[in-house]
Structure formats: C-alpha cells, structure tokens
C-alpha cells in the first residue's frame, strides 16, 4: 500500500507567522492557477485583455476628434488619454476579476485551507500586475508609432495606479460579500459603476473643472486616484485639490464593511 | 464533529421548491463511519456540498470539522492544465509538498504518460482515477463520499477499497448512497433521509427497510401527483 504524503514542513507551527506564510502560499497557488489556466486555455480571451485598452484608446481619441475636444494639458492627445485610461483600466479590471471570485472560488472552498479572501487577493494582485503590462504595451506602441511618451514621476504614477486598482478590488470585495447574502447584489455593483467612465477624469482633468462643480466631482475617489496617476505620468501636469488620503479611506472603509458583512453572515 | 443543526436547504426546480433538508439534525463524530441512504435525485450531492462548505443552508447551521475531504472530488481540476500541474496546484492549496503528492498520485492513478497530458484529453474514468488518487494523497480526518467509494475497473476499485480501508483505520467517513449494499460493510452507523430529515437506525437492515418504504411511498406520491395533473388537464 502506498502511504499518503505528509504535510509540508512550514505548516507545522501554529504561530501567526506560519498563518501568514500559509496564506501567501495559497494566494501564490491561486495566482499560478489563474495564469496557467489563462495561458493554456482560451488564448484569444487572454489576448483580448490587452486588445481592449487599445480599442478604448482609439474610441476615446475618435470621441475627442468628433467633439473637437482639445487636450487641457501640454501634451499630445494619445498620451493624455493613456494617462487617464490606464488607471481606469486598473480599476475596472480589478472590479471584474474580484466580482467573479464567488463563482471562481466555489469549487475550491472545499479545501479547508482556502478562503474567499484568498481568491479576492489573488485576483486583485493579478490584475494589478496586468495593468502594468497593459501600460507597457500601450506606451511602447505610443512611442513606436507616434514617437510620444512621458513619465515624470514613476513612483507617483505607480502609487496612483495602485490606488485605482485597490479601489476597484475593495469595491468588488464589498459586493462579493453582499452577493453571498443575495446574488442580485452583484448586478447592482456593476450597474452603480456605469457612470464611473465619464466622471473619473478620463476625458478631463480636475484642474479644468469649474469651482462650482469641483467639490461634487471630488466625492468620487476614483477621480483622486486617476489624477494622482496622471500627475505622476505627465511632465506638465500637477493636479490641485486631490488627496491620496481620500481614496485610501474609501479602500479601508470598503474592506471593513465587507469584512463586517462576512463576519455577520458567518455568525 | 460533523452534522446539521435545524438545517433547511431547498432549491427551485421549474418554479417548484424541491426540499433536500427540512429542519434536519445530524451529529457525526470525526472518526465515525456513517452511511445515510438517500433516494436518487433527492439531494445526495447537495448534502455533501453542504458538509464540504461549498454550499450554504437556507436556514440552520452546518457543523464542520477541519480535515474533511470529499472522496473522488474532481471539481478543483482545471481542464487545460495537465494532471501533474493540477496535482502540484492542489498540493500548494492544501499545504502539502507538491513533488511528494505528485509522485503518490502518478503511482496510485496508474495514468502513466497521460498524467502529463491536459485533463481535457482525459476520459471520465481517467479523471476519476486522478481524483481518487488526490483524495487518498490528502491526509483527511473525515472522508465525505457521494455514492462512489471507488472507480474504474475491478482492479482499480479494489485498490481504492484497500486504500480507503487503510485510511479509515484513523479517519471517519460520511457516505451518502442510494444503494443500501454500498453502506453495509463499510459503515458502523446507518440512517436514512426521510422527508428532509435524518433518521438514524439501530442497524443497516433497519435503515434499508426504512429507506425502501420511503422510496415506495414517494413513488406512490409521484403517481398520485401525476394522476392529479391529468385531472387538472
């Protein structure tokens, strides 16, 4: 009779550190699983992830041309669109990926070591990396085809883009938690996002908004993240009136609310 | 400890609620071997999914111990990944050494070179072999089985039976089945699911009789419903 394999060595100590390591192992395994299934599965679907941003950029460029919209910053149109679209894509991809967690994790929650939160973190991490791949692709094409490209403060740009991804992930996590109670909440979460594309600074900057409407737009945390990312990318742009603390508070609030919903349901 | 406390679970089928559990209670010790007879199509898989944590009750609570493992579970496999990649991935998810688990599964499943092929090229039987190999590779405290305690040809079934008998020296088993002979030899305690409630019996014979009566009764009910539907028409 063949004997069953034993537990890996790192599982044994019951200290907090081992719990963190075990969670990191599970998250790494979920990320690897997702990448492997995407790469070896529907390659067309995987490639579509990188084609969609190009279509969005082309569509936005066409809209600028159609409405005679002039770029409000000293840069070319494509670079301006990239500066707003890339963080938005990070947000949107994180929302889409994390929203699918309930369905994607259902078959894996049978493993006592796997929790829904592992799926949320692994999806968010993968999309966070993905957005930088998307940026590398569109920035390379912009440089090759039009000879344009800017990166004023890379750290600030990474921070802003990361904020956008984290906002998307925390927003979707909240709705994932609500979906556990009633499946209809998933659709509500998607419907509520519809205006986000138009009010989050993809087509405009916060600096050009009239004083009357600026406070209204600043309620949107995604506008802050997009503007921080844009300020990091563009050489001649510095967003006024935006703050990193505001989206960070939203992220913390969403995670806390989601955790509270999950805890209430568990009890 | 495993079981249900005042648990209700139903699902809608063509607009009609189909009750699997109705305010049901069950208590099973982690190392007990319990067989529950359930008529086909009345919720065996739902009960295993509830115990495994992949489904939630509409009301009441499911008591779950850690270290439970559904026997022959293939739901975690990804079709586009090879058998080896799937096992490595599962090993990482459950905290086992991937190489050690993979070596065990390659040998136990007897898949040979097919082990290194994508699962979408596997037949149902090959997939089942890998699933059973994975089940026996994971040191479970309680196995959860939905009708199947083995798969494939007689030789492989015997291998599964021997592996299960070996594991059950220290582990428990909750086996839901629609064939009474399946639970007879393998379980110590027997019961049946009658109208959404667990009824535990003193012996396998008693459970079988109760189960048989319940199946006959529900067949008669269905016949009457069918007649009533003709009247309405």
Image: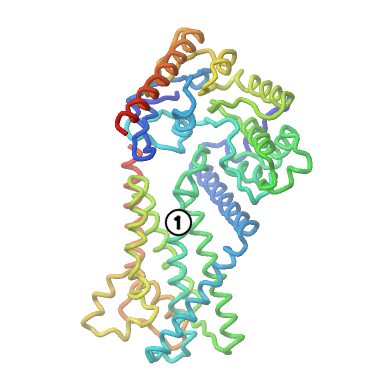
The figure's colour scheme reads rainbow
Which residue is drawn at the image coordinates 54% and 44% (left, top)? A22
Find residue B52 and report its horizontal and vertical position in percent. Answer: 48, 33
In the image: residue A199, left or right of residue A164: left
Relative to B141, is A186 above or below? below
In the image: residue A147, left or right of residue B42: right
Find residue A34 and report its horizontal and vertical position in percent. Answer: 57, 54
Find residue B135 and report its horizontal and vertical position in percent. Answer: 62, 32
Which residue is at the front of the view, B95 or A46? Answer: A46
- Kindly identify which residue carries mark 1: A98
> In the figure, residue A6 lies in which quadrant?
top right
> In the figure, residue B111 lies in which quadrant?
top right
Which residue is drawn at the image coordinates 55% and 17% (left, top)? B183
Q: Residue furthest left?
A: A212
Secondary structure of the residue carrying numbered label 1: helix
Q: Quadrant of the N terminus of chain A?
A: top right
Which residue is at the front of the view, B66 or B84? Answer: B84
Q: How many labels, in total?
A: 1
Q: Chain of mark 1?
A: A
Which residue is at the front of the view, A27 or B203? Answer: B203
In the image: residue A23, left or right of residue A211: right
Find residue A97 and report its horizontal and vertical position in percent. Answer: 47, 58
Relative to A7, is A86 above or below? below
- How many residues crowd mark 1 within 10 Å: few (<14), some (14–19), many (20+)? many
Q: Residue furthest right?
A: B113
Which residue is at the front of the view, A232 or B206? Answer: B206
Q: Quadrant of the C terminus of chain A?
A: top left
Relative to A176, is A19 above or below? above
């Amino acid at each position: 009779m063949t004997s069953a394999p034993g537990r890996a060595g790192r599982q044994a100590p019951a200290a907090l550190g081992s719990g963190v390591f075990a969670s990191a192992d599970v998250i790494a395994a979920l990320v690897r699983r997702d990448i492997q299934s995407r790469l070896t599965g529907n390659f067309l679907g995987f490639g579509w992830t990188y084609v969609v941003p190009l279509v969005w950029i082309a569509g936005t460029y066409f809209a600028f041309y159609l409405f005679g919209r002039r770029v409000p910053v000293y840069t070319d149109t494509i670079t301006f669109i990239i500066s707003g679209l890339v963080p938005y894509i990070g947000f949107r991809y994180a929302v889409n990926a994390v929203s699918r967690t309930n369905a994607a994790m259902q078959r894996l929650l049978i493993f006592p070591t796997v929790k829904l939160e592992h799926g949320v973190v692994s999806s968010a991490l993968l999309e966070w990396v993905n957005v930088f791949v998307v940026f590398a692709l569109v920035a390379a094409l912009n440089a090759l085809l039009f000879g344009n490209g800017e990166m004023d403060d890379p750290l600030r740009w990474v921070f802003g883009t990361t904020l956008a991804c984290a906002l998307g992930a925390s927003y979707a996590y909240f709705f994932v938690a609500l979906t556990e109670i009633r499946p209809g909440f998933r659709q509500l979460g998607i419907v509520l996002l519809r205006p986000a594309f138009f009010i989050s600074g993809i087509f405009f900057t916060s600096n050009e908004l009239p004083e009357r409407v600026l406070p209204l737009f600043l309620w949107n945390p995604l506008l802050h993240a997009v503007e921080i990312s844009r300020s990091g990318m563009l050489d001649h742009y510095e967003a006024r009136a935006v703050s990193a603390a505001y989206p960070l508070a939203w992220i913390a609030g969403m995670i806390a609310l989601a955790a509270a919903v999950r805890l209430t349901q568990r009890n | 400890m495993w079981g249900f406390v005042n648990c209700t679970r139903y699902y809608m089928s063509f607009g009609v609620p189909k009750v699997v559990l109705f305010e049901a209670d069950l208590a099973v010790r982690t190392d007990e071997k319990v067989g529950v007879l359930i008529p086909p199509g009345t919720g065996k898989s739902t009960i295993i999914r509830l115990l495994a944590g992949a489904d939630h009750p509409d009301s009441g609570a499911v008591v779950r111990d850690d270290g439970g493992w559904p026997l022959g579970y293939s739901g975690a496999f990804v079709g586009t990944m090879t058998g080896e990649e799937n096992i490595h991935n599962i090993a990482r998810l459950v905290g086992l050494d991937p190489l050690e688990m993979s070596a065990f599964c390659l040998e136990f499943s007897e898949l040979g070179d097919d082990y290194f092929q994508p699962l979408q090229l596997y037949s149902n039987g090959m997939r089942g072999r890998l699933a059973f190999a994975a089940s026996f590779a994971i040191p479970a405290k309680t196995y959860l089985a939905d009708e199947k305690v083995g798969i494939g040809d007689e030789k492989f079934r015997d291998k599964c039976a021997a592996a299960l008998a070996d594991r059950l020296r220290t582990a428990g088993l909750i086996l839901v089945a629609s064939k009474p002979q399946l639970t007879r030899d393998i379980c110590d305690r027997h019961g049946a699911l009658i109208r959404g409630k667990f009824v535990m019996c003193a012996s396998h014979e008693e459970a079988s009789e109760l189960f048989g009566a319940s199946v006959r009764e529900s067949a008669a009910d269905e016949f009457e419903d069918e007649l009533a539907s003709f009247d309405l028409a």
